[in-house]
Amino acid sequence: MPTAKELLSEKKAKEVITVSADMSVQDACKLMRTHRIGCLVVTRGDQMIEGIFTERDVVNRLVAEDKDASDTKVGELMTREVIVVEPDRPIAEIEAIMKQNRIRHLPVAGDKEPLGLLSIGDVMAHDASKNKQMVHYLTEYIYGRH
């Protein structure tokens, strides 16, 4: 069964974009736009994961509450209770965690620092690829072209 580490190795963008909790929300949003991503991992100086900052945090905790993005810090809005998975966690379990907790992003971390970030899109793309292969093999089998 494929693992988080294997799925990370398939990703085009392997870099984990991290920020500190004291960065302004405006600068964090610009960083997300530059990298075309929907979330940032918030770390302390030692790379320990402190939280996750997502587009959803911006909408629910900044825009909906009429806060100023240039005066608000990421630490004020970030999601602090972050589920982090180990590199050897099977993809099926990762998908179940995302569905059960209604989250779109899961950091993958080793002993201390983040190794990567998996999105629900990464998991769905993997599933689609796997299903496409299965359809191909079954079609070949049905038509006797194996």
Image (cartoon, rainbow, N blue to C red):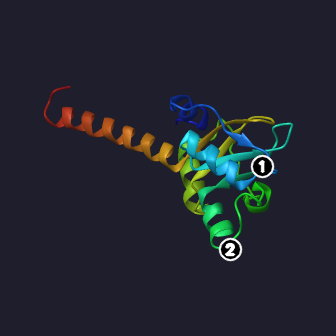
Residue 74 appears at what percent x and percent y? 75, 55
Occupied quadrant, residue 16: top right
Residue 24 appears at what percent x and percent y? 75, 53
- Residue 65 versus residue 35 in the image, above or below: below
Mark 2: secondary structure: loop
2 or 1: tag closer to the N-terminus: 1
Q: Amino acid at mark 2?
A: Glu
Residue 69 appears at what percent x and percent y? 70, 60
Q: Residue furthest bottom?
A: 65
Between 99 and 88, the one nearer to me in the picture: 99
Q: Which residue is mark 1?
A: 23
Please tell me how crowded label 2 is: few (under 14), some (14-19), or many (20+) other residues with Cα within 10 Å.
Answer: few
Q: Amino acid at mark 1?
A: Met
Residue 51 appears at what percent x and percent y? 75, 52
Between 27 and 87, the one nearer to me in the picture: 27
Q: Which residue is mark 2?
A: 65
Residue depicted at 61% across the width and 65% down the height? 59
Question: Which mark, residue 120?
Answer: none
Occupied quadrant, residue 131: top left
Q: Is residue 23 left or right of residue 9?
A: right
Q: How many marks?
A: 2
Q: Is residue 8 left or right of residue 70?
A: left
Residue depicted at 63% across the width and 32% down the height? 15
Q: Residue furthest top?
A: 146
Between 136 and 53, the one nearer to me in the picture: 53
Occupied quadrant, residue 35: top right
Mark 2 and mark 1 residues within 8 Å of each other at the beta carbon: no
